[in-house]
Image (cartoon, helix red, strand yellow):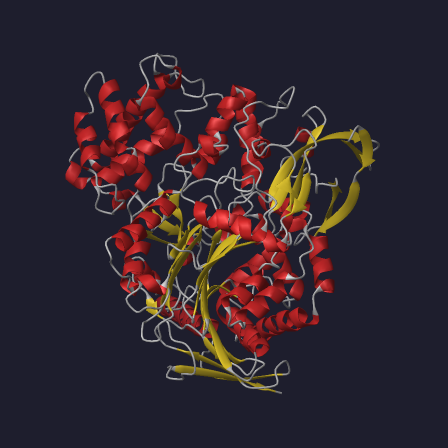
Amino acid sequence: MFGKFIISTITIVILSSFVFIYQSIPNYQGEWSSQHINNDVKIYRDKTYGIPHIHSKTLKEGYYGLGFVHAQDRLWQLHLRRMSSQGRLSEIFGFRQDILNIDKYIRNLGYLESCRRIVEKLSEEAKVHLQSYADGINDGVKSLQMLPIEFKILGVQFQDWEILDSVAFIKLMSLLNVNDMFHEFMRTKFDELYGRELANILGSVGPHNQFDSDVTEVQEKEWVQFMQTNNVSYNKKFGQNSKSENEKATQYNLTEILQSIPEYYSNYIFPTLKASNAWVISGNHTKSGRPHLANDPHLDNNIPSQWYQAEIYFQMENQEYNFIIGGTLPGLPFSLSGRSKYLGWGLTTLYSDGGDIYEEEILQKDNENLLYKFNNGWIPCKKTIEIIKIKGLEDQSITIFHTHHGPIMQYYIENSKLRDHNGHFYSLQSIVHIDDYQSFDGFIHFAQGKDLKQSMEFLKNICYPNNGMVFISHDNHIGYLSTGRLVIKEGHPDENAYVKKNNKEWIRYVPYQEIPMIIDPEKGYIVVANNKFIPDNELSWNSQPTSRARRINDLITQMIKNGQKFSVLDHIKFQSDTYDSYACNTKEELIQLLKKYDKKKELINEIVILENWTCKWDQESSGALLYGVFEYFYSFKFHSQLDEAVIKQWNNFYIFDSFHFKNLIDMNNAQPNDQILNQPYCNGQVQDKCALNLVESLREAKQFINEKFGNQTIDWKWGSLHNQVFPHAFSKTLLAFIFERRIPYSSNRRAVGVSSYDLDGSFNGKTGSNYKQIISMDPEESNFFVIDTGISGNPFSKLYTNQMDIWKQNKYVKMKFGNRTDYDLLYVIHPN
């Protein structure tokens, strides 16, 4: 009897699970009706990948359809992005101190009031289109049989999407991509420890301290011509400035500050654009005679993917039909990387300096008010109150103080710790605090553009994020544009790499007509890969070179030099390239240093492996494994006064690459006991410690690999150690096995086919080419795209990871677009 009861119970559980799984997967075939549209919206999908093709009468109704499919496939992702960007995670997860700290941090950024003002100031056209997207999301939710499993687990409901939610999402996404401000604390600490000259070297401040800084997005000849044509006003020449204007360095605990910057948003929620590659090739250099574009943004890995592929086929105001297809970010109605009938576009992060940390001298007037010092006077801080709701507990209120620079970041670390800093607090000034109500019009008009120059002009209205964008057009043009506000600042650009302590102010923004824009450069191609965007100039002074930019430029110029014409297959090969230009360009110097300082000759075999390494980070490569582990141990041979939070901040970015590879060359050219071999930032006490640390790191790498894989080099494979990990909000729970995925992978952060990993000893990749596209303006050539996981955010759907299988093999999905209906599934939304 008891056995029958157990069998019955198990049967009920299994059947219930099947019913739950069935009901949790949205219907891609059927009908719905809505009061928010005036015409039928048809959503076609193929069974294999489920990519939606939205056919609508107008672009507005196309945005409605996009919102609808975002809700069908990515509702939990939408909800997390909304709650995170507004500091409301505690409403989902209840009281957890780490979650509450994130909410405080987000509220402290001080942009929500700006978001509310923007919603009020939006043009009628922008409001109509953004509201249509929101209506689509909300109707999409109503069409579901049940909310995604994450809502059930946490016992929360979805609240109607509003325009404010999209505005807040793009605010925080943009702020997280204003990178240099996070490095200002680090450089300032180096200044405190070693003095300004060495701090500039370690922080790669200025072109004279950078490796390979001549590879720029807009190249020298093009830039000179642009400056002359547009009478550019920010063309002042600067020399090296190694003097610090700070009479006394402020003592503060950098580790506490860096550790306090929450990682949750970048690991699980927000598409922080860590890096990207994009290039365009003129039709003069292609087999078809039509221009090509390739783009692969590199965001933090996530499951579901940060990206979502979709097409909108719509009728423009002139009654002509157009289409937009490419990568969208759920939460926004725009295709940020994609193509239309007339244009193709791709984007990368532009490492311009759109944010600064100011050290503020604060006087506490009473328990309620603060004053800050400016121009020898004391000015009252503006004060705002933020209410944080916590599921199951009483609300908490926090007070945010603002100077004219921006919010005082008292929730970087606890107030009590800040007040130990000799009365100095830190405020944040950022372009993200601008009331940007014109960007949305720019996106909407750009999507319907035909003429390349005119369409690029629309995008000059964008305040943020700062991106380097490339374009191709149906009538055989290519172009480049820097988007987002570019800031002219007081003082020498060296000083802007540090926490500002001397009241150096922002002067103005670059006028629209002076924003860098290039069309049809003589060389016939443009490459953007997060490298310095214009030749040495105050705006790009502290932008860093990248190995990816060097490699892509080398690949393209070599083909052109050889008289070869480009096909779409060439771009596929480039996007999967694992060659490390910087490691290869300095490998000889590294080998010579290792041979010279390996006094006991204990590393002869390991040195031979490095000598024979092809500089490709392939899965089967023993050289890549040895070099990668060697780099890991070498990363911790600096700054014994500091701990891992600071070291990781330095080593996990292009700043370290620029310092490290330049330093290898300088050390190899040095004589024993030269200063370059005995710098105070190198760990140890022995003579020539900086070079000996290379040997010690290789010795530690040998021991690590032997313990993990044995001493037979045939078993040494990079892919055995390095995985791409795709985390989920539940990754640190017992449910991780349902949601999270990981796969063996190749590459590293410097290769074109990028895979970045943290310095935590796991070698797990956390950033990759999450979305890839290749576009040709020749109607006879195929276009391709792919994402790293799948369209669906439902772990029980076959569409959850089915693109991961082809993505890891460097394969793609063929784009289908235009007036075609040969798809497997059709969902029709009728007007009420």
Tell me which residue sits at (77%, 46%) in the image: 384
- Specify the quadrant that holds the C terminus: bottom right
Tell me which residue sits at (20%, 29%) in the image: 607
Q: Which residue lies furthest to the front in this view?
A: 228
Tag count:
0
Tell me which residue sits at (70%, 42%) in the image: 407
Q: Which residue lies furthest to the right in this view?
A: 366
**Quadrant in the picture for residue 520:** bottom left
Residue placed most toward the observer, 691 or 525:
525
Residue placed most toward the observer, 269 or 13:
269
Q: Is residue 418 left or right of residue 778?
A: right
Relative image position of residue 46 (x, y in whole percent): 38, 77
- Specify the quadrant that holds the N terminus: bottom left
* Residue 217 seen in this snapshot: no
Residue placed most toward the observer, 85 or 291:
291
- Above or below 54: residue 690: above
Q: Is residue 566 left or right of residue 660?
A: left
Q: Is residue 557 left or right of residue 163?
A: left
Relative image position of residue 130 (x, y in whole percent): 63, 69
